[in-house]
Amino acid sequence: MEARLRKLMESLPDGIDGALLLSAVNRQYYLGIVSSAGTLLVTRRKSYFIVDFRYIELARAKVRGAEVILQEDLEAQLGKLIEKEELTTIGTDVSTLTLSTYRDYDRMTGGRLTADGRLEEVISGQRQVKSEEELSCMAEAARILDRVYARILPFVRAGVQSRELQRRLGILASEEGSERASFGFAITAGDNWQEDDGYRDRVLPGRCLQTGDLVTLRMASRCQGYWADMSRTVQIGKASAEKKRLYEQAVKVQRILKHELRENACILTAVQKAAAETAGDGILIPGDVINAKEPDFGHGIGLELQEMPELSVECGKILKKGTALYVTVKAAIPGNCSVRIGDVVVVEENGARFLGAGSSPELIEV
Amino acid sequence: MERRIEVLMQNFPENVDAVLISGYEIRRYYTRTAIPGALLLVTKSAAWIFAPSRWQKEAAAIPEVISIPGNHVWENLNETLCREGIRNLAVQADEIRVSEYERLKRTAPCEVIADGRLDAVIYRQNCIKSEEEVQKLQRAQDIADKTFRETLNYIHAGMSDWELQKIVGTLFLDFGSEWDHFGHVMGVGVNTSMPHVRPNGTVIQPGDFVMVDIGGMVDGYGSDMTRMFAIEYADDRKREIYEIVRAAQKAGREAIALGKPCCEVDRAAREIIEEAGYGKNYLHGLGHTVGICVPGGPRFNQTDTTPLFSGLIMTVEPGIYLPGEFGVRIEDMMHITEDGVYNMTHSPHELIVV
């Protein structure tokens, strides 16, 4: 954590002489503690963490590289530090902070806050590239999902309600050691081919699985704060040649992405190469099944389930070694059925490597 | 079903042509549809939803709202603002992100207002729960009461708090809650001294307190309750603290009355804990509003002077937290109406030993 803070101190953008970080995820990343409150002030010279009595003991024991200060009168305390460090322009978490909170802090810092987005770019660039330690947490989270998937398969049967499967996923994720049990689940079959992955507020369909259904399972798990995400599609009963081809197409596109998403590759180029495979035969591959012109093959992952960069045509960024990504491909025959596979990978010199076992190359029939 | 968007249209802040709802929960309240990454634009006579393409189907199904699908929601919003000749647009300062606000100010073809007046209008409307909403919350709470009662049958010493989490999460789903993760606040033993404790693998010991701060969810409406129970026995110290909190919680509930400032309700409970000598171990306010997330709603704390009004649903949840020992919190959900104050939580307040 100390090295992370130092790196941020060294890479503050020109014209920004301090960073005031208020998001929980940034506290976790730079300080190594989980807390619902606390103000991290980073300058080129020194860092400070002001936190209230609830977390002070934890902070004193765990935080390295920042001076820990018990919060009393935050405004006065910030004022003193700003004067001492001679700060004039302070950046902050502009994409997560609400306008009200921003205004409060702007007042407390004597109008020194800036909504300049460059600071966040520096931070997200830094967070994208994972250390060995971070990758080992993510790999463990991915292995938990592999075990959960292996154990859920015997329950994916005709006659089982989707709700029951979801409950089972929660139990298995808990048993296999995920810090947070599984969340999403979606069935893709016939009339609801457009359904997206499980979303936290999705009301589950009460319908039973039937022979002939393509079933998509979406699972996530967390290990020491780091997420892994996974999508799998299996067929109940015998799959038609068309469905098998659809599945294989999705695997093929994911393989292209895995090959293209390598160190120093441009995301845009990789996404375009994969998207080029998607045309024809009424089969749409991009994650966004409705608008094939805007393919979306996933995003970064780490302390948050969804981080930068986005694997879309709008992202012209160059990949760095160690970047963790959730690479997902959805293939659909509009009005009929769809397949989704998704895995966590890490970018390496010659391509991306699965942190877990990866999808089966052939459609599994259960 | 009440027409929520129409109510908003009738209560626009003065000199505002249109309002933008960018917060997920609030947008869900107005549209009764959960769509992430969308924007809701409302003028005095019409409403539009700008939703990413993948949510096109859900967006199109919202009654009396014009759906404009496309992944570039902010650009699509600006086009509509331009076409409709909107001169000024109010946004919620408590919801809009700084980066979104900056972008809107830079690109919108109209003035952008973020002076807090829209926030106030929306909070007021959100806080007054309709019958439909009360029913949903009551259903969610009934599920939570049932889950709590059933949980007691399974918990014993030697079990870890992860197993507790698994049992509670499973029972919730079985009883019909739609919350599909198991991330409730709960803890055992010394961990209960942290108000927002989460399971960490601790094994339950005889004599431990177990804290469960749990809620069911029905149509996006989440209930909220907290109960403690003891494993096998509770020593005198635990019983003493439990009874203080129980008395404070009762005093808080009984202090609720229409028109009374929120801080006075807080005081009624706080005094009991202070008089017992544990004022410094009571780390938070007495309660908050419940339902669709309303950050700006009235709160039972030491500073909120909002007079209580009919239609509110609020929690009453005093606590005492003794670092290195244990903590106690008891929480109910109260519905405040013209006809009286109703406790929506039906689990007992007496200390349960299992």
Image: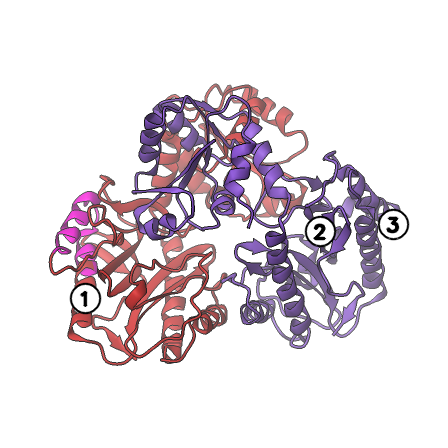
Whether A271 is among the magenta residues is yes
Q: Which residue is mark 1?
A: A246
Q: Which residue is mark 2?
A: B335
- Residue at the far right: name it: B275
Classify A278 as above or below B76.
below
- Amino acid type assigned to the residue bearing label 3 in the image: Ala
- Residue at the far left: name it: A280
Classify A171 as above or below B245.
below
Label 2 secondary element: strand
- Amino acid type assigned to the residue bearing label 2 in the image: His
Q: Which label is found at residue A9?
A: none
Q: Nearer the viewer, mark 1 or mark 2?
A: 2
Residue in the foreground of this view, choosing between A36 and B214: B214
> Disc 2 and disc 3: Cα gap in Å?
29 Å
State whether discs 2 and 3 lie on one chain: yes
Residue A111 coordinates in the image, percent (x, y): 52, 19
Q: Which residues are magenta?
A: A254-279
- Amino acid type assigned to the residue bearing label 1 in the image: Leu
Q: Is A12 displayed left or right of A39 in the figure?
A: left
Is residue B271 visible in this depiction of the protein? yes
Q: Mark 3 packing: few (<14 Cα in 10 Å), some, or many (20+)?
A: few
Chain B colour?
A: purple
Q: Is A217 displayed left or right of A248 in the figure?
A: right
Whether A78 is among the magenta residues is no
Residue A2 coordinates in the image, percent (x, y): 46, 42
Q: Chain of mark 1?
A: A
Residue A107 coordinates in the image, percent (x, y): 57, 22
Q: Which residue is mark 3?
A: B276
